[in-house]
Image (cartoon, rainbow, N blue to C red):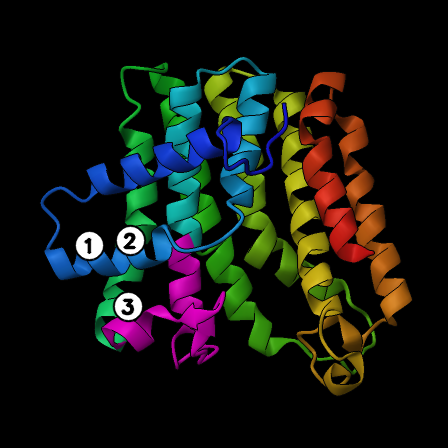
Amino acid sequence: MKPESSPTGGPASDLESAIVRLARESLRGVPARLGEAMLYSWLGPGKRMRPRLVLAVAQALRLDNEIAYSLGAAIEAVHAYTLVHDDLPALDNDDLRRGRPTNHKVFGEGLALLAGDALALAGPELVLGLRGRIPADRLTELLAAILEAAGARGVIAGQAEEPELKAASGNPAALYEVFRKKTGALFRAALTLPAIAAGADAPTREALGRLGDEIGVSFQIADDLEDDFAAKKGDAAHVAAYLSPAAARAEAERRLDADAALSPALREALAPFLAELRKKLA
């Protein structure tokens, strides 16, 4: 499977169309302005990497595409909520994201906060919409997994712990743990949700979860590598406070080798994504 976007159609464009459809359908009965704010971030520009990972794993495990689309849209909703809240003045206070005004700059802080809250719940709602299409025990596991990723043991934990980081020790272990929660939690969910839905065995799910954690850390390191390292050396929440660019690059590369524990079919399905991340590190 080739997950890259294609203007002439294919898996990526089918996935994008499905996310748009599911997002719009989920807003029935939602106040118009709130729905507009939700869609602004849910369907905003981006690579859709997490939903693409969902689809890649789903196809490798022969899970129905429509189920995968629902899981991908759910992950994208949760991801959008994290971005909306992260950009707010109380946190990162960003005015721009991906070349356009952030949600609160368009809709105001109050509505942006509410839109983020609603997006956080829209993900689990989409998962719940799969009842009757997958066994009840798997549905329960899916809900537990996406709630953990979105909540106080996942993304929120990483956000809460980030301000407490201190670079004085010179040990980046605490930073990696923040990266694992803040960024890795949703990559873990993207890889494990389709495995749960497909009824994959525990070792497969555990291996996918570990890879998701490592992708999250590597992804955040790759983002940091795009910054001016000299200017970031005093920032305990940045890898520049602990490692040289070369050492950071090597650390990120090493973590991506976690795919070795996967089956050949899963490794093949995920190879384009790991190659994409390695290219970002180059």
Determine the residue positioned at 38% across, 65% down: 84
Determine the residue positioned at 75% across, 67% down: 225
Q: State whether residue 212 is above or below residue 216.
A: above
Within 10 angstroms of label 1, few (less than 14), some, or many (20 or more) residues? some
Q: Determine the image quadrant of residue 231.
A: bottom right
Residue 179, x across and y down, in percent: 64, 59
Q: Which disc number belongs to residue 113?
A: 3
The numbered mark, 1 or 3, whose residue comes first in the sequence reads 1
Say whether marks 2 and 1 touch (CB < 8 Å): yes
Q: Determine the image quadrant of residue 220.
A: bottom right
Query: In the picture provided, is 39 more to the left or to the right than 58?
Result: left
Query: Which residues make up the magenta segment?
Result: 80-108
Residue 14, x across and y down, in percent: 43, 29
Q: State whether residue 23 is above or below residue 226.
A: above
Residue 97, x across and y down, in percent: 47, 68
Quarter placement of the N terminus: top right
Q: CA distance from mark 1 to mark 3?
A: 13 Å
Which one is in front in this view, the residue at disc 2 or the one at disc 3? 2
Query: In the picture provided, is 230 more to the left or to the right than 115?
Result: right
Determine the residue positioned at 75% across, 70% down: 239
Q: CA distance from mark 2 to mark 3?
A: 14 Å
Between 176 and 103, the one nearer to me in the picture: 103
Determine the residue positioned at 72% across, 60% down: 222
Judging from the image, what secondary structure is the residue with disc 2 in? helix
Answer whether residue 277 is magenta in the image.
Answer: no
User: What residue is shown with label 2?
Assistant: 39
User: What residue is shown with label 1?
Assistant: 35
Answer whether residue 95 is magenta in the image.
Answer: yes
Q: Determine the image quadrant of residue 86.
A: bottom left
